[in-house]
């Protein structure tokens, strides 16, 4: 038996891979012990679902090898951005809210109703949310970052690109790897894997890892009872088991099962600008409650001190399995290969949150299982592919069922009622200094059958006379539950016609049908809503005294979390949609070293529902549906392989136009999803890789120039015109997270200096120009240009039996923010009327306190590896 003889004699799983994986043999079966690539010809990608040399693929692909990833310290997709120009990955209130963006395009991940613009695919299995793909990736073989719409082969929700992750496969050569790490901030990590044959046709691989680290934020706990005095710690573990079965010469089956969990506290934001509400926070908290304001309420210097009196615990669990089976079909069927990929995954989170990020006890969410979400996915894909002398063809079908369960809960702290009183009375005091600023005026608005005279007297005495109405109940205020069920079906084909030896035409089409249903119940608890109802009942008396200010004041009593209209409100919606997407590419090889190409692609991102309380004024929005997003992308590029095929130079011009761009933005009181009519992203992607004449020395890098802008639009163009004031800076403005320039460079050196000793070093750096980190483009959310640098030095044996590494991440301790946002209830940035600049924003009237989630500081440590 040919296969049995092969398995008995070979020492390379790459050879086995040539027999069993994919069409010509998948790179995922290559062995980790193989030599490093020495020419461009060694760079193999599967960006078109078949094994090809990078320089033969008419797509912008940043291919990162196992060695490059290891040298740069990449453990998850957030680490990946230092090697990828034009890509950013950020987290906000928890690691469950992770967002990847390419060329300035991505979807904020705080709401599970929104799917990703950048798809994450791990070992052929699509992860429907960026957060679901965030975690310890374990042993990596390579990562491919595909830029631009990739919907033909990778499906919907890849309108901005794909992060295609290939982990190390089982090997029939026995092997063992182990590593141990220590570092600053109390970092400790251990991991290991073992692989080898179980029988002549069955091999396995088992990986396990655990990582711990103290937090890098110092927390002032204010009123308590939060016990943790740091934040952004790390405590997670991963187990991944695999089986590779080769039943005969013409078939292979790869089974993967994995489980990971996080039990951490994360993430507290800190003030980058403290506004005029500071005295009220200070009066209600033990200690200052937040960072004291700068003179004139200007921007604050960078600080890793945050304020939170409540815990920010997060428990995240991710588990699942997949089976990929490949069958070489008989020759009378064209010598094609049938591939089946089946998967099941479940991801869940249980979170806690200090909502106001201050030391005062204003509002919070308990980590009791009532705040978090879970996503369960079942997928099945079939592909049949083959090749002749003139045609590479592929047809396929894909079906998935996704179930989302979200629970949301809100707790009123003891300081909520007096804090709101401070806010309302301060606003009145600014117009009439005779009215005192007081923490006791809420009862003035809510007293049963309040009269205009009594209301005016109550305000004038700071609530001492003619008050006594109810305040907001301390404790849980609401508990909402949502269940969304989605089914998606797709048929697709991707075919390349070799017109001549130099000229290729590629046509790809995909037809997708999406069906989604949403069921939910919004429930106020502990009498929540009564305060809102009591104030509304006194609207006549309040209006007689406050006049035109009445709707705004009453709106503060009936914010989404305290609105009586949400009590026992049933949510029941259904919708379906379909879309034809695809691509057409033409490539021409000028000579063996130069490939030119042009392409058009249409991408599709599914419609969805905002799984949150949404209201217009104080009236709950009847439907939270937002439409599908589509993109038309044009590219023209050149791929050059020079210097005896040791130098790669690639450059591509891209022009992308997104319609109904799904923007998720936090307005200070709620997350709102709006479909922006148009977003354009134009620019140039360039990559290079050089295997230098110096043995063991390689260079890799790239640059992305991006001009990403919103089109002009008015309030009438939005689903909810009332949201326009908070989005009025967007028309014609630069998109957030879209730096004009983004450059990366990595230098890797690994060489034997004696028969038994090798040394190496690596440097990986990234520089980006300034960009705005807020989806509403407020000026205080701007991040200045900055650079980060990772370094590593190694010493080890030539046979890699042992390696000692000394590493540092963010070598220069660069201080930068990930995402800035409006602190809840702490001032306002936008005005209710148009300002002289034509928007609703006036910097002179901006009273908003701004918080931000920070980038990681400098970390360093040592890692000891063993390999047998």
Image (cartoon, helix red, strand yellow):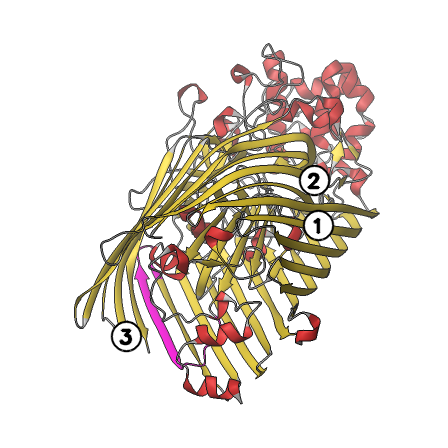
Q: Residue at x 55, y 69 (%)?
A: 259
Q: Which residue is mark 2?
A: 629
In the image as oriented, which residue stretches furthest toward the left?
A: 754
Q: In the displayed structure, would residue 14 be above or below residue 400?
A: below
- Distance between the alpha carbons at the discs numbered 1 and 2: 17 Å
How packed is label 2: few (under 14 Cα within 10 Å), some, or many (20 or more)?
A: many
Image location of residue 193, percent across then percent down = 42, 75
Question: Is 174 left, or right, of 50 in this rendering?
Answer: left
Question: Is 278 left, or right, of 768 in this rendering?
Answer: right
Q: Which residue is mark 3?
A: 801
Report the span colored magenta: 169-187
Asked whether 837 or 82 is in front, the reply is: 82
Which numbered disc, 3 or 2, marks the residue that appears first in the sequence? 2
Q: Which residue is mark 1?
A: 509
3 and 2 marks in contact (CB < 8 Å):
no
Which numbered disc, 1 or 3, marks the residue that appears first in the sequence? 1
Image location of residue 666, percent across then percent down = 61, 36
């Amino acid at each position: 038996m040919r296969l049995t003889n092969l398995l008995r004699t070979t020492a390379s799983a790459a050879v086995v891979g040539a027999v069993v994986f994919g069409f010509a043999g998948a790179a995922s079966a290559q062995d980790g012990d193989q030599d490093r690539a020495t020419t461009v010809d060694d760079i193999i990608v599967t960006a078109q679902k078949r094994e090809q040399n990078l320089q033969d693929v008419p797509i912008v692909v940043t291919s990162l090898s196992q060695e490059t990833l290891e040298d740069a310290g990449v453990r998850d997709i957030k680490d990946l951005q230092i090697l990828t120009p034009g890509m950013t990955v950020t987290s906000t209130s928890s690691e469950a809210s992770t967002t990847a963006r390419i060329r300035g395009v991505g979807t904020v991940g705080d709401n599970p109703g929104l799917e990703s613009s950048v798809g994450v695919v791990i070992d052929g299995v699509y992860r429907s949310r960026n957060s679901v793909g965030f975690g310890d990736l374990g042993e990596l073989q390579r990562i491919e970052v595909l830029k631009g719409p990739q919907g033909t082969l990778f499906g919907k929700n890849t309108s901005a690109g794909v992060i295609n992750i290939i982990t190390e496969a089982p090997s029939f050569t026995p092997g063992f790897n182990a590593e141990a790490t220590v570092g600053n901030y109390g970092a400790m990590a251990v991991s290991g894997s073992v692989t080898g044959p179980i029988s002549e046709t069955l091999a396995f691989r088992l990986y396990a890892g655990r990582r711990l680290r103290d937090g890098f934020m110092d927390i002032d706990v204010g009123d308590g009872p939060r016990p943790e005095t740091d934040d952004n710690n790390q405590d997670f573990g991963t187990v991944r088991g695999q089986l590779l079965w080769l039943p005969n010469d013409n078939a292979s089956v790869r089974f993967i099962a994995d489980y990971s969990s996080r039990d951490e506290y994360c993430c507290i934001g800190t003030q980058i600008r403290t506004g005029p509400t500071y005295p009220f926070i200070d009066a209600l908290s033990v200690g200052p409650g937040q960072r004291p304001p700068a003179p004139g309420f200007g921007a604050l210097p960078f600080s890793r001190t945050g304020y939170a009196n409540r815990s920010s615990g997060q428990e995240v669990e991710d588990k699942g399995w997949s089976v990929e089976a490949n069958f070489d079909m008989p020759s009378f069927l064209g010598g094609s290969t049938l591939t089946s990929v089946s998967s099941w995954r479940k991801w869940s989170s249980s979170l806690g949150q200090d909502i106001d990020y201050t030391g005062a006890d204003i509002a919070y969410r308990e980590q009791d299982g009532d705040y978090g979400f879970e996503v369960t996915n079942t997928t099945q894909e079939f592909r049949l592919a083959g090749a002749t002398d003139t045609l590479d063809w592929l047809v396929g079908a894909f079906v998935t069922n996704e179930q989302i369960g979200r629970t949301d809960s809100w707790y009123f702290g003891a300081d909520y009622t007096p804090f709101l009183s401070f806010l309302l009375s301060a606003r009145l005091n600014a117009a009439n200094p005779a009215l005192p600023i007081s923490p006791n005026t809420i009862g003035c608005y809510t007293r049963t059958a309040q009269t205009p005279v009594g209301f005016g007297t109550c305000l004038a005495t700071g609530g001492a006379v003619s008050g006594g109405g109810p305040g907001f109940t301390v404790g849980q205020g609401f508990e909402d539950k949502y269940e969304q069920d989605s089914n998606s079906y797709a048929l697709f084909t991707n075919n390349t016609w070799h017109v001549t030896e130099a000229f290729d035409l590629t046509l790809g089409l995909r037809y997708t049908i999406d069906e989604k249903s949403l069921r939910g119940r919004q429930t106020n608890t502990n009498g929540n809503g009564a305060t809102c109802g009591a104030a509304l009942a006194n609207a006549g008396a309040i209006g007689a005294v406050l006049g035109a200010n009445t709707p705004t004041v009453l709106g503060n009593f009936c914010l989404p979390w305290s609105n009586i209209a949400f009590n026992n409100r049933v949510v029941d919606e259904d919708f379906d949609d379909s879309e034809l997407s695809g691509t057409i590419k033409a490539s021409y090889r000028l000579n063996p070293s130069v490939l030119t190409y042009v392409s058009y692609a249409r991408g599709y991102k599914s419609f969805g529902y905002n799984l949150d309380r949404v209201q217009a004024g104080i009236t709950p929005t009847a439907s939270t549906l937002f439409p599908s997003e589509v993109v038309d992308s044009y590219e023209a590029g050149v791929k050059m392989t020079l210097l005896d095929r040791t130098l790669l130079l690639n450059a591509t011009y891209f022009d992308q136009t997104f319609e109904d761009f799904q923007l998720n933005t936090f307005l200070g009181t709620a997350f709102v999803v709006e479909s922006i009519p148009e977003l354009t992203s134009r620019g140039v992607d360039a990559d290079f890789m050089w295997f230098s004449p110096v043995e063991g020395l390689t260079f890799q890098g790239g640059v992305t120039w991006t001009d990403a802008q919103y089109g002009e639009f008015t309030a009438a163009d939005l689903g909810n015109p009332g949201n326009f004031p908070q989005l009025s800076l967007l028309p014609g403005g630069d998109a957030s997270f879209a730096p004009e320039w983004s450059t990366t460079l990595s230098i890797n050196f690994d060489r034997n200096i004696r028969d038994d000793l090798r040394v190496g070093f690596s440097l990986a750096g990234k520089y980006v120009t300034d960009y705005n980190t807020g989806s509403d483009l407020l000026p205080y959310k701007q991040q200045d240009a900055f650079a980060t640098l990772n370094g590593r030095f190694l010493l080890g044996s030539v046979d890699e039996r042992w390696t000692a590494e000394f590493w540092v991440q963010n070598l220069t301790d660069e201080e930068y923010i990930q995402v800035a946002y409006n602190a809840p209830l702490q001032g306002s940035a936008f005005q209710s009327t148009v300002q002289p600049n034509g928007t609703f924003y006036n910097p002179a009237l901006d009273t908003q306190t701004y918080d931000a989630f920070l980038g990681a500081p400098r970390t360093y440590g040592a890692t000891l590896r063993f390999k047998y």
